Structures are given as C-alpha cells and as structure tokens.
Amino acid sequence: MDLQLHIPSDEQAINPVCDFTYSWCLNSGLTKQEASKFTIAVSELITDIILFAYPESENKFIDLTFRQTLSDIELIASEAGEPFDPDQHRYSPESALDKGDFEGAGLRIIRRFTDDFLFINRGREGKEFRLQKEVDTHYLDELMELSRSLKPKEPEKKLADVSYSIKQITPADAEDIAKLIYRTYEYTYTKEDLYFPKKIEQTLIGKEKLGVITRGEKGEALGYFAILPKEDSNIAEVGEAVVSPDYRKQGIMSNMMEHLIKVGRSHNLKALYGKAVTNHPVSQRVNHKFGFTSTGLMLLDTNNVVFKGFDEQYPQPVSVIIDVLPLQENKPKDVYLPAKYQQLLTESYQQLGIPITPKKPNGYTMAEKSDADLEINYADSTAHIILNKYGPDFKSVLQEMINSLLEQETLNAIYLDLPLQNEATPSQLKELEGLGFIYCGLAPYFHQGADYIRLQKICMPLDFDLVDVHSDFGKQIKSFIANEYSRNS
Amino acid sequence: MSIPEIHREDDTLTVCINGGFNLWVKNMITNHIGEEVQNLDIDLTNCKYIDTEGIIFLYEWQQNGQKLQLKNPPEVFFEMLDILELSDSWQPNIINKNEELL
C-alpha cells in the first residue's frame, strides 16, 4: 500500500515527517532501533533536498511516497530542484576533522541506515530518491502465528475419498491460507505476506484481494486461489494458487478457477490475467483450459521459487507468461500499432476476441514534459516503467532512468509499458532504438483501462530453452522474442 | 509534541529534545544562543532520532571551546559517531541514566 505526503521544502516539515516515518516504520514491522535508523535516513534526505535542491526558493514542494510490503519498505522522495549527483558528494573524515567540512556526511548515514539508496535522474521531470529497507519478518510479533504453521497436519484421506466444497474466502480463513502456502512452498514463496495470517486477514478486510478456498468434508483446507484487483485499472490478477501437495491432480485447481471467473464477472471486472511461471507448465495449462490467451512473455520476471513436488533446481530467474481472459464484450477501439510489432499485436487482439481499429497517426501534440511511473521490485530484481505522457524529452528521460537504475542496482530485467491508444507510440517506439528493448507482449486494459505494449530489456544472460511455454500462440510469442533477443545481442 | 523545550539561565542553555534533533531543532537552539551562552546542556532522553545536522552542531560547539553536556544520548548517536569516524577524536561529556558523569 502507498501513502503519500506533499510537503513544503521547509525545515519546519522535518519533525512531522520524521514522526510520521517512525510510526509508519513500526507499523510496517521494523524494530524500534531499525525504525529510528530509517527515520534518520529520511531526515537526512529531506534536509539535503531543502538545503541543496531548493537553496533559495520559496513555495517549492517535495513529494513523498511511503510504500510498504511485508518484506520491505520504500520511501520515494521526488523533487524538481537543482541538479544533483550523490556520487559527487562523498564524505571525507579527514576533511571533517581537519577543516570542519562535513560534506556528504548525511549521504553516508543514509547508505549505512538503509539496505538500498537509489538516485534516479528523471530529466525535466526532476529527481527521485529511493530509500529501501528489508523487514526482517522473523522479528515480527506474528512469529508465534507463523510457528503454528510450521508443522501442519495433512488431512489423512486422499481427495478421492472425501467430498469438498469451494467457498469465497473470508478473514476467518487467513490462518489456513498461511498453512497451505507453507505446505506448497515452505519458505520460498516470494510474497511473504502469505506466511502471516494477520496480514492476509488485513488484505481481506480491506478487499485488496478476493478469492476462494477449498475445504474437505471435515473443514480442512485443501486449496486456495485469489484474484488481486489491480490498483490502476479495472482488471485483476489471478494468483497465489495453492493446492495441498497430496491433493494435486484431482481437479481442485480447475474448480477453483471456475469459481474465480464467476467472482470476477460478479465484480464487473474487464478482464482477469495471470502471470504463469514457465519452469513448469501446470499453471499455464489451467489458464488455457479456462479460455485465457497468452499475450506476452516476461523474461526473468521472478527469482526462483521452489515448489514442493516440482522441479526444485532452476538455474535462472523464472520467466512468466501473461495470460489474459476478457470478461466483458468490447466495442472496437482505436489503436496505434508500431509497424515492427503490428502483426503480433493484431493476432494477440484476435486471439483475445477484442475488436480493434488500427489507426495511422495523424499528428499529435506532446506534453510539455514526459511523465512516467517507476516501480522497483527489490525481491525479484526487476524494474517496471509505465509511460503516462510523452514529452519531447522522452528518450533522454528514459535513458537517464535506465542509466541510474543500472549504475546502482543489479537488475535481471526492466519492463516498459507504452500506451497503444496514444498516437505518439509508433514514432516514439522507434526512438528507443539502441536502448536494448525488445518485445514482451500486449497488456490489455493494464493501466487506467487502456491497452499497452510491454517491452523488456534483459540485463543478464538467459537460456531460452529453459522457458517452457504451453500454448501454440505462447510459443509463437516466445519464438518472436527469442529471435529479436538474438538479433539484439 | 516534538517541539524542544529550551531554557536559558545565566550562561547556560538547557535544551530538552523530544523526538527528533535535526535542522529545524538546531536552528531553534541557535536562535536562543547569544554571546552570553557558554554552556549547553542537552537532554536527549526522549530523542528518538538525531541526524547529522544535530551531531555536527554539537561537535562544532565543543570544538569551539564551549562546554557541552549530553544527557542519555540514544544508542544510535554513538553508532553515528563511529560511521562518521568521529569517535576517536571527540568524547563529549555524557551523563547516563544514573546521572553519573562518564
């Protein structure tokens, strides 16, 4: 969940922001000591912005985004003050002691008191600083609840001998869901929230997820499957699918998917989508059985996940297939397809049954400056840029952001979403030549209800033979991407 | 409330920090310091976060030959001195929780 503050670039704002930060850190699961250190890092950052980004100016502002998951917290500070490069301000203890020159002292403290400190230059859009801290989940109060899920009792009978029912999940199901996740993944599932009943309960109370749970005749939990509504669009991801190991290959997953689709329709969602792993084809098969269409292949999207009962050794981050299921009838919509990918995009729309009217750009007006959102997934070592508006500085802003990311982070991949209903996309995509982006796929309805083309930049060696794609069209997408990757490298 | 309590008596300024010790607090203290103030007694018992603006201010005050006494600095204060490599060259007068002068 994101919380946002818009504060004046004024020293009076430091104390209230620090008080808020400290409290937010504690609520996110940091110890008091860690909360103090993260707050000090935030205090240093805001002070530097006030003193050096806006040295003379009045009525200037800083935007702060507090982003929290159970496994980490992130503070994003955005401002549009004077240019600045943290690397040019290194602290020297000798200068401090001999000359009283403490330049860079705050930046040294920030680096020591956070797990990651990123500086992203966004050209005319300004600058962005990101402070990240991992939350040591084993120090959380919920530890006791976690320990209760350490040695779960498997139901004695096999599914063939028991009847089962599928119901929509409620907050009371939280503990059973955590146990199911443990049985399936032990402690390797990347969404750590799912090991904590209280966190699951909170997301269910807040309607951040919907889903179904399968129970045996004695009420024992056998399976769980969720849909996670996307924050910026009226679609939802199907995910967090688990079936207790002894009850696999009994059709539970398929039955739960059937229920999820009904839940999605009843909530008037435009579409469901899934990110099916490609180290085994099971999830892809289930998706296709229910009419999902593969529209993209996100290479190296997630760090290896160990599935009990499946291949336990996989030598590279797992790529995922984007599978999409439209849930509503669609009227034809105008799209501007880049020539390079026109055929594949058109076929993707056809496979989805979404009618389109491809248009030729007829002149367009750019925004004064580009506007793009950046999301960094620290656990999976990926970054995702979503373009909202094109400005004349589009390529340079993008280049700056990529350079900033690659200089400071070891990323597996960077994804880039460009709007297909924007006339500028075909020509702006040509501008990206040389930045190393290749095709990823079609992302229909993914942001603000609009369709996007997703591109990807691969930042580490990749073996395509290990990417197991199930559907024929998925294989076609994979082949197209592999060829482009090969040509680019 | 995170507003520091500041009192002056003769040549001594007594400050009780609540919450943070940062640029804003440093400037508040500086505004209360006239030529007559030679001693600074700072109670950090309720200080949860002190940043480098606070630390550098304290360091420079003492380096200028004026007296400084700190009461119950938080643990993170000493960690920051280590990070900034000031520990060996600066030993501020500190009163711990038992009111004993170290």
Image: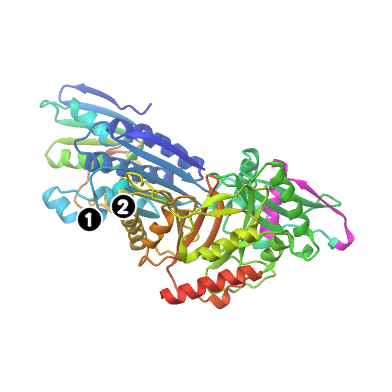
The structure residue drawn at horizontal position 68% and vertical position 49%, both measured from the top left corner, is A327
Question: Which of the numbered marks, if any, corresponds to residue A202?
Answer: none
* Residue A163 located within the stretch drawn in magenta: yes
Element at badge 1? loop
Q: Where is residue A374 drawn, in percent x and y? A: 42, 51
Q: Amino acid at mark 2?
A: Asp
Q: Which residues are magenta?
A: A160-183
Helix, strand or loop at label 2? It is: loop
Q: Main secondary structure of the magenta part?
A: helix
Q: Is residue A138 left or right of residue A485?
A: right
Q: Position of residue A465 (x, y in %)?
A: 56, 78
- The mark found on residue A90 in the picture is 1
Residue A365 appears in view: yes
Can you tell which mark lies on residue A393?
2
Disc 2 to disc 1, how far (Cα)? 30 Å
A23 or A358: which is nearer to us? A358
Residue beneath the point at 70% across and 70% down? A309
Give the percent coordinates (x, y) of residue A79. 31, 42
Q: Chain of mark 1?
A: A
Task: From this view, report whether residue A104 is shown above or below residue B37.
Answer: below
Q: Is residue B60 above or below residue A327?
A: above
Quarter holding the C terminus of chain A is bottom left
Amino acid type of the residue that numbered disc 1 sits on in the rendered structure: Arg
* Residue A301 seen in render: no
* Residue A127 placement, left or right of A436: left
